[in-house]
Amino acid sequence: MFENTKAFSGFSVDDIAKAREFYGETLGLAVEEDNGMLAIHIADGGDIMAYPKENHVPATFTILNFPVDDIDQAVDDLSARGVTFERYPQFEQDEKGIMRSEGPPIAWFLDPAGNVLAVREE
């Protein structure tokens, strides 16, 4: 039924203007606001929709993973842009906030709406 349909993901935020600034300027993604929603353009032509929700509750799980070749460089670059990395007591993380002991190296951070994002080394 959907074999020829391009699907896309979406998540809520509490402030489209803050989301536009964060995803567009801080993360450097192409973004486009239309009809009060934000289209976040990712590599290979994919889009993710951020929509305003008055009673937004941040996702407590990782909603977006950004694969990178060098996680240390990505964390350093994001830190220089003002991004703070999350610390989770159940994971052993280094001084940069990178978890290296289980699976691929990964570091988590929040968008302005409190949704969990991650950079992950491939």
Image: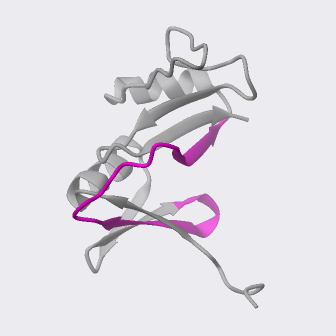
| Tally of numbered discs | 0
- Where is residue 65 drawn, in percent x and y? 58, 45
- Name the spot of residue 56 as percent of width and height, x first: 29, 57
Q: Residue furthest bottom?
A: 1
Residue 49 sits above or below residue 14 on the image: below
Residue 2 in which image quadrant: bottom right
| 73 lies above or below 35 | above
**Which sits in the foreground, 54 or 5?**
54
**Where residue 10 sits in the image (x, y, percent)?**
47, 66
Q: Quick one: 79 or 13, which is closer to the camera?
A: 13
Residue at figure coordinates x 57%, y 71% from the top left: 8
Q: What span is colored magenta in the figure?
A: 42-68
Q: Residue at x 28, y 80 (%)?
A: 35
Residue 49 on the magenta segment: yes
Tell me where residue 106 appears, x and y as whole percent.
62, 28
Q: Is residue 52 above or below residue 61?
A: below
Quadrant assignment for the C terminus: top right
Q: Is residue 110 on the magenta stretch? A: no
